[in-house]
Amino acid sequence: MMLSGNSTFIWSPFSLAFSPPKSIPCLQSSFSFKPYSRSGRSPPSKTAVKMSTSQTLIEHVVLFKVKENTDPSKVNAMVTELNSLVSIDEVLHLAAGPVFRNRFSSLNFTHALHSRYKTKEDLEAYAANPSHVGVVKESVLPIVEDAMAVDWIADGGYEDDLVAPPPGSAVRLSFLKLKESLGDNVKSEILGVIKGLKRDFPEIKQITCGENFSPARAKGYSLASFAVFPGMSEMDAVDAKEELVNSQKEKIKEYLESVFVVDYVIPTPASL
């Protein structure tokens, strides 16, 4: 996939203001999908797997921009096929669906995929799996004009959290592009602030963050975070805490060149 785009924006990951999402040929945030596999069987549920305090997970996020005027049936087919990849053995969790809103970016991604793995080797096996290769070739590339991928290692500390966030959860993905020549101590400081958001904002049920280890596909964004809320109302409640939000932003804004944020809702599987 062609990766492009390199703009500078002001960081405000929990800002009250945002640009309305561009009208796109996809389903809305209430979208539900019917799990599908090429074998004709529904993929197995993996929602019972839990993270332990000592467990490390690999986070894999891909953002897609569907071409304008794409037939909605092709968009829906792409999402269904992407969700079918949860049946691959190495995948702990996978969910794909339409973006609810883009913030602070002209990239205008329309869809997001998030998945989790035990190791980098498992992620590589997923990428090379014939089912994955086939979905990308047949359902993604023909209708997508831009894409971005970010991968990071999420440390443990999520004993009470499921690997698979519940359907209907609201997710905020934040991508940070740092100023040049910043050391590892600064990166650690930024990641520490992000991890602390769960303490300061109880509406956040799970948050992971880390340094991207796939720079070729990330458009220059080197840090990323994944925050889960019970629903959009809880996410909006955090945005409304303007004073507390600004105090967190002040801690690290001097290190940042740009940030963009994507919000989406984890789709609910349709009844079989």
Image (spheres, rainbow, N blue to C red):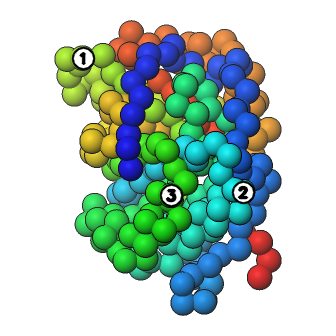
The part of the image, by quadrant, that contains residue 171 is top right
Q: Tell whether 67 sits left or right of 132.
A: right
Label of residue 72 in the image: 2
The residue shown at (30%, 27%) is 187
Q: Which is more N-terminal, label 3 or label 2?
A: 2
Q: Position of residue 230 (x, y in %)?
A: 72, 48
Question: In this rendering, does residue 189 appear at all?
Answer: no
Q: Which residue is mark 3?
A: 142
Do the numbered discs 2 and 3 sit on residues whose CB atoms are within 8 Å? Answer: no
Q: Earlier in the sequence, mark 2 or mark 1?
A: 2
Question: x%, y% of residue 242?
Answer: 69, 15
94 lies above or below 147: below
Q: Residue at x 39, y 17 (%)?
A: 256
Q: Position of residue 76 (x, y in %)?
A: 68, 62
Mark 2 → mark 1, Cα distance in angstroms: 41 Å
Q: Residue type at mark 2? A: Pro
Element on which disc 3 rests? loop
User: What type is the residue that disc 3 sits on?
Assistant: Pro
Q: Nearer the viewer, mark 3 or mark 1?
A: 3
Comparing 201 with 229, the one in front is: 229
Which residue in the structure is indicated by mark 1?
A: 180
Number of the label disc, if any, that sits on residue 51? none
- Disc 1 residue type? Glu
